[in-house]
Amino acid sequence: MSTVALPEYVHHYHDPAHADDRSFVRKYIFSTDHKIIGIQFLFMSLTFLLIGGLLAMLIRWQLGWPGRPLPGGAVLGETRMPGGIMLPEFYNSLMTMHGTIMIFFAVMPLLVGVFANYLIPLQVGAPDMAFPRLNMASFWLAVVSGILMFAGFFVEAGHAAAGWTSYAPLSVVPEYSGVYNGQVLWTVSLIILGFSSLAGAVNYITTIINMRAPGMTLLRLPLPTWALFITSILILLAIPVLTGALILLLFDQVLGTGFFIPEMGGEPLLWQHMFWYFGHPEVYILILPSFGFVSEIIANGARKPVFGYTAMVLALAAIAFLGWIVWGHHMFQSGMNPMLGVGFMATTMVIAVPTAIKVFNWIGTLWQGNLHFHSPMLYSLAFVSMFVIGGFSGVFLASTPVDIPLHDTYFVVAHIHYVLFGGSLFGIFAALTYWFPKMFGRTMNERINKIHFALTFVFFNLTFFPMHELGVNGMLRRVYDYTQYALFQDLVDLNRFISLSAFALFASQLIYAANYIWSLGRGARASANPWRANSLEWTVPSPPPHGNFDSMPVVYRGPYEYSSPESEEDYLPQDAPPAEAPRPEPAPTFA
């Protein structure tokens, strides 16, 4: 048997698995254990997911029953208002905060903050993150950022209302938006969140590069770790661009500079370029981790090795690289040179190639597999199908002649939700369910999860697919009362159907939430490896002890050796040593 070289940090590996005897505050509040920090991110981001969902329901209420309030009643967003449900100013705040909270405080920390923290050390065979105290600081910076963002709802002038993209000069000049205090809180909050994200990305990258167990080569890493590694590189490169733009925006808001104000010689388009130069890599920050989770779960559900493992890794890297040269497709309407627009159109269409490779490889993994339709597998299959629909609508929007009439319509809303709800959130449901036994030592109720899957799949499509029709009919997003336009007055019934479907979709999530909370204390006890999976996190107890491993694991094989002839079972853990090679038979002789 060949020996495996030990990484440098093994020589000071003095923290084997043991009972954690720290105080409650040090263990659960100001913890440096990567697993506890991952769970802290989990409950913080699930709270914001609920808040963002409630804001969406208020938006759909307004769009399903449109019109300005009538005199004589109370309205949301003000102490005393003429009547109805809300006024345009509050609606604009809802639109701004729904997008901001869902992207920056729900989906992004769920995908990266939770699973990068929890999974990376376990999957690479490390006792903890490379920088545990920095890891703790990254979480508490995110908490401070979230409190500041939420506090904007209670300032006197009202919260930010310039959209989640906060285009200048609307987000700069108080006379334009009327919500100066809330807009400043929005800016400061995201600056702080940027430092939190950078601290996390540095930690994740360093841990993967320097703290892999003996034998854990890069091409033996599970695909979730590969996806989180590439995502962390995107964060490290993209977040400083946004943070720099936000600091300039803050200077304009507070110090009276004019970086983005035309009357002072500034350039509003500069904000758009800086925002979207961050914003399109951010789209892949919000989807690449789900690619890794779904790849892991589909291989497990099919009981087959991942089809084209190396191609999957290269496709992840290609998507990340191409994501940097497509940001201009968000700005076809900005008056850019048509030749430049053609360049952005071409690069945007090229990015469909590595994405298609991943889809074909998932299908190849499923093909002739011994399929097990457990609930994580169902969520993963929904992810693939919904993401494909979102990808097809993205091809339309990548084409300049088609994008111009569809720009800023509900066709774009449908596209982004098929990518980020049908994609990212289905991937999150798959991952939350799959790794729930490892995190909490208990299992969720499988029947309830399947009911939640069915209801979510149906009501998601009933909510967002009709939005393509709204977009083709020209209905603009961010419009408070579309019935004031004669062209859109016939769309009330379709909007009302979408709103009712959205309410049912939101109610369906309460089923999952109840199952999740109930299972934390009352779910059946989980074994160390309930899914019969191969990667290292399934070789330790559920939940893992402080320090993760009793001794440094040694890796002998890849993460997807399902249905291996070496094992009587249909899987082989990564730390299972190879069987003794049989002595070859003597070659036959011929007369």
Image (tube, grey):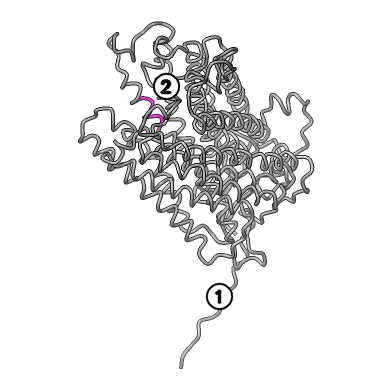
Q: Is residue 428 magenta?
A: no
Q: Secondary structure at mark 2?
A: loop
Closer-to-camera residue (156/80): 80
* Image point (70%, 37%), residue name: 547
Categorize mark 2 by other alpha carbons within 10 Å: few (<14), some (14-19), many (20+): many
Nearest to viewer (mark 1 / mark 2): 2
The vertical placement of 565 against 41, above or below, is below
- Residue 65: image x %, image y %? 52, 31
Decide: marks 1, 2 in contact (CB < 8 A)?
A: no
Q: CA distance from mark 1 to mark 2?
A: 70 Å
The vertical placement of 275 against 435, above or below, is above
Apparent side of residue 403 relative to residue 27 in the rendered image (left or right): left
Q: In this figure, which residue is indicated by the disc labeled 2?
A: 166
* Image point (67%, 67%), residue name: 568
The vertical placement of 549 against 529, above or below, is above
Categorize mark 1 by other alpha carbons within 10 Å: few (<14), some (14-19), many (20+): few
Which disc is residue 584 wearing?
A: 1
- Residue 16: image x %, image y %? 71, 39
Mark closer to the chain start, 1 or 2: 2
Which three-letter amino acid code belongs to the residue tagged 1? Pro
Which three-letter amino acid code belongs to the residue tagged 2? Ser
The magenta segment is: 274-279
The vertical placement of 9 against 372, above or below, is above
